[in-house]
Amino acid sequence: MNLSTLHAELVSCTRCPRLVGWRERVGREKRRAYLEWEYWAKPVPGFGDPQAEILLFGLAPGAHGSNRTGRPFTGDASGDFLYPALYRAGLANQPLSRHRGDGLELRHVYITSAVRCAPPDNKPLPEELRNCSAWTNRELPLLPNVRVYLAIGRVGHEALLNYHALRKSAYPFAHGAEFRLPEGRVLLDTYHVSRQNTNTGKLTAEMLDTVLERAKQLAGI
Ligand code: DU
Ligand code: SF4
């Protein structure tokens, strides 16, 4: 099993009925600006460098972002904040991320998320998080060089703790927090890159740059 074969299997997952309904409905109804698009409307596979030392772990696909384009953080405000930061850090070959054929490549970084189908209001149910953890359990072992986890938001943080069977109370989420996990990897946290956080100044570009520099330092990049 490698990442490509895992992703080929993932894209036909229908385990969460509510999310299957939602991802397809959003793809039918579309947003006005994207009427010409054929939405992806399927589970969104992880993306990036298979030899990554840093794993970015998010929440879920955005309804009109990666649920439209089929690549994490591609085509919405969250990606417009995240990818330029990865580019500034030397971890992406370009700041722009528009569609799967845009030439974007990551170095040292791989991106996936706690659930792989867009949820209504960006809020997966506990059962959906449990369902999709089965994919996390299969995907993370295929990334042999990961030394640093960067959780993008609390839900990603908790899914990573769950993956390692660690208790939330011992590892409280906080922007900039840094935890050495028992098996040796380091878990870093950032507030989520959602428009809600970046427009209000809760998460600034400088704050994200600082966390990414720390991730690189810990990963020896
Ligand atoms: O075809 P491939 O080399 O397996 O790459 C698939 C996909 O992964 C491509 O869109 C670029 C991305 N990628 C990357 O971002 N960084 C890498 O180091 C290798 C592949
Ligand atoms: Fe499958 Fe995960 Fe999508 Fe649920 S969220 S349908 S488990 S890919």
Image: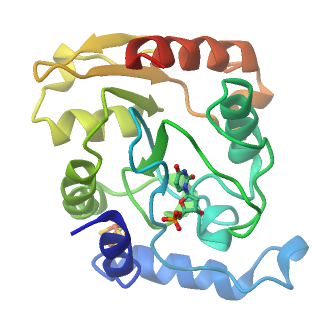
Q: Give the quarter of the image for residue 10.
A: bottom left
Quadrant location of residue 2? bottom left
- Vertical comparison of 69 with 197: above or below: below
Which quadrant of the figure contains the N terminus? bottom left
Give the residue drawn at x 72%, y 33%: 87
For residue 61, side relative to residue 198 (left or right): left
Residue 159 spot, x, y in % from top left: 28, 41
Q: Is residue 63 above or below residue 207?
A: below
Residue drawn at (71%, 42%), measured in percent from left and top?
93
Which of the two residues, 141 or 159, is positioned nearer the viewer here?
141
Residue 21 rendering spot, x and y as whole percentages: 47, 83
Q: Is residue 183 left or right of residue 14?
A: left
- Classify the position of ligand 2 by quadrant: top left, top right, bottom left or bottom right: bottom left
Please name whichever residue, 32 or 78, is drawn nearer the observer in this view of the structure: 78
Residue 42: x, y in percent?
49, 79
Q: Which residue is located at x 67 percent, y 21 percent?
A: 203
